[in-house]
Structures are given as structure tokens and as C-alpha cells.
Amino acid sequence: MKFLNIAASALALSLVAFGASAQEYALRFQSSDPAGNPNFILQQSFSEAVKEKSGGRMTVEILPVGTIVDYKETQEAIQAGLIDGHITDTSYFAGKDPAFGLIANPVGAWSDPAEMIDFVENGGGKELMNELLEPYGLHFIGVSTPGLEAFVSKVPLDKVADLKGVKIRTPEGLIANVFAAAGAAPVNLPASEVYTALDKGVIDAADYSVFSVNQETGMNDIAPNPVYPGFHSLPLVEVSMSKDKWDALPDDLKKVLIDSVKVFQQTQLKTLKERDLKAVEEAKASGKITIHNWSADERAKFRGIARGEWAKFSEKSKMAKKVFDGINKYLTEKGLIK
């Protein structure tokens, strides 16, 4: 890797700055988002909360994507001491273990961010995350998410049966498999081609983004039957750091980091929810867009179909099976699977 030749000197400098005798702890985390991106801006609430809650004893500088290394190399960079932690979509590391992809976005599992967050914080998810991360020298601090994606559609979709034969843009992999199992016809297209493909009738619907983004980009104008709240995709964004440096922190500063991630999480959810609700009202006011909201029974039916694909995916690794069992146990106990 391109950074390994400077890793030793970087680690030495980092340890000096992070020494146990130091009165201040200065950390650098790299984000998977670019500067100016709404999610990157919201991540600053984590940095601000750390400084405030620690009384200035600890600071966290959040670097934009690519500042030190590529977004897929942050695990190695943390191990090498080039950065202290990252804020990133866990699915980027699915190439190392399929379990990262499954826990990052078990398609169809969550109908609300609160469900995923509760699974992570209280349902065994954080333990699974640490079991996944610790072999790579990382410790999981906490979770956030950019929110539950809405679903873009030119045709009315009110239930699972309505997906039959619908040409849906999806990324390759688990999400495409889930939609195929539900009767749809997945089409693999990059995000940059979704608008044109919808406009020309190449596809009927698309996995794209949250409602406010879909509205701002004009997706709902050419595909005026969105499903909101969505039923399929809700990514897990992890905040993790070097395990060695985590272990060296005093307990009160560990708590500061955990509490500050919670501030970021709630700030992100509140802000994005407000943006979505404003966009929903604008869409309704236009008189041209019909918003469809699936019933709990239909969401559970889709989740049941998805579970069959998660089970197949879980055969890819030992940890993927543990993640599948954990998610399945949580959803069953909460009555979210029928």
C-alpha cells in the first residue's frame, strides 16, 4: 500500500501526541464523505461534542475522504498510525469479510433508523461489530446512518406483489438478489445514469437515495410514485478508532467519545428527517406526486423474502453467519419478521 513506507514515522509521532502522560488527546479521523457534503458537515457535531464534553482535554479533527488514504484503505491507515479513526460506511470492507456487507446493510431489515440503532446499541450489534473489527486493530465506538432511503418509482407500488416484473435499478450483489427474489427485474446501473434511464423508460424504478435528495434531483418529477418511508436500504455508518489507542484512554474520555457519537447520530437523524419531511410536503403540494407508504404487513413480507437471501449470503463466512443469526434473532424477538 502507498502509505506503508511512512507508517513507522507516523505511528511514532502519533504515540508522542497520544502519550498516557499527555494532558490533551488530539485525534484525527478520516471521513468517507467529501468536504461540503451534508453528511460531512453533520459529522462536525461529533468533533464539537468531544471538545465540549472533555473540557478541551480531547479534540477530534475530521478529515474529508481521500485526505490521507483512499476510502477503502482507512482500516490499514488506522493500523499503521496514519490516522486514529474513521467515520465510514461499513460496507466498504465487505471484500475482506462478507459480514461487513451484511451488517452494514441487510436489505429490507429496517423500516426506521431507530430499529437499526437499537439493534446495534442494545441487540448485540456492537458486540458483532467489535468481533469483526478487532482483528483489524480497530474498536467500534458507535453508529449513525444517513437515513432510510425512499424508493423511486414511475409505477404505483403498494405491496410486494406490485414488484413483479418491475425493472429496478440496483447495485450488484445482495440488494439485486433480494429484489429478484421478490419478483422484480434488477438492472445494474451506476447512480449517474439513473435519471436518464428512468426518463427514457429503460427502468421503472430505482434504489437511489433519501427522499429529500430524490426530490432535489428531480427524480420524483419523472418517477412520481415514490415509496416513503422506504422499505429496503438503510446503511450503517460506523465511528471506530485504533483499539490500542482506545485501550490507552482513561475511562472518562472513552465515555466522552461514546456520548459524542450519540450527539452526532441524533443530530444527523433529526436534520435529515426534517429535510425529508419538508421535501415530502413540497412533493405533495405539487399535486403531481403520489407518495406510497407500505403497511407493516407488507414490510414484514418483504423482510421475510430478504431473509432468505441473507441466509444464502451468510454462508460466505463464519462471521457472516454470526451476523445473520444476530439480526434474525433481533427481528424475530421484536416481531418484525412474519
Image (tube, rainbow, N blue to C red):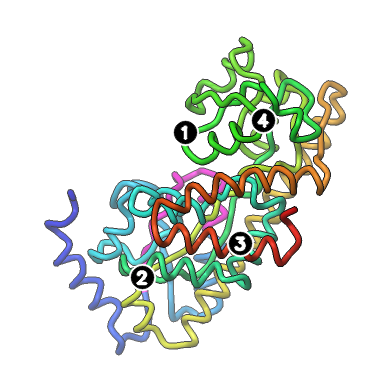
Q: How far apart are marks 2 and 3 (CA)?
A: 22 Å
Which span is picked out in magenta?
26-43
Residue in view at x 47 percent, y 59 percent? 321
Label 3: which residue? 265
| Residue nearer the viewer, 2 or 38 | 2
Closer to the chain start, of discs 3 and 1, is: 1
Q: Distance between the residues labelled 3 and 1?
A: 28 Å
> Residue 183, how many percent across, how many down?
65, 29
- When asked about the image quadrant of residue 99, the answer is bottom left
Helix, strand or loop at mark 1: loop
Label 4: which residue? 216
> Residue 335, how many percent across, how many down?
76, 61
Amino acid of disc 1: Glu
Helix, strand or loop at mark 3: helix
Badge 2 density bin: few <14, some 14–19, many ≥20, Cα 10 Å: few
Amino acid of disc 2: Glu
Amino acid of disc 3: Gln
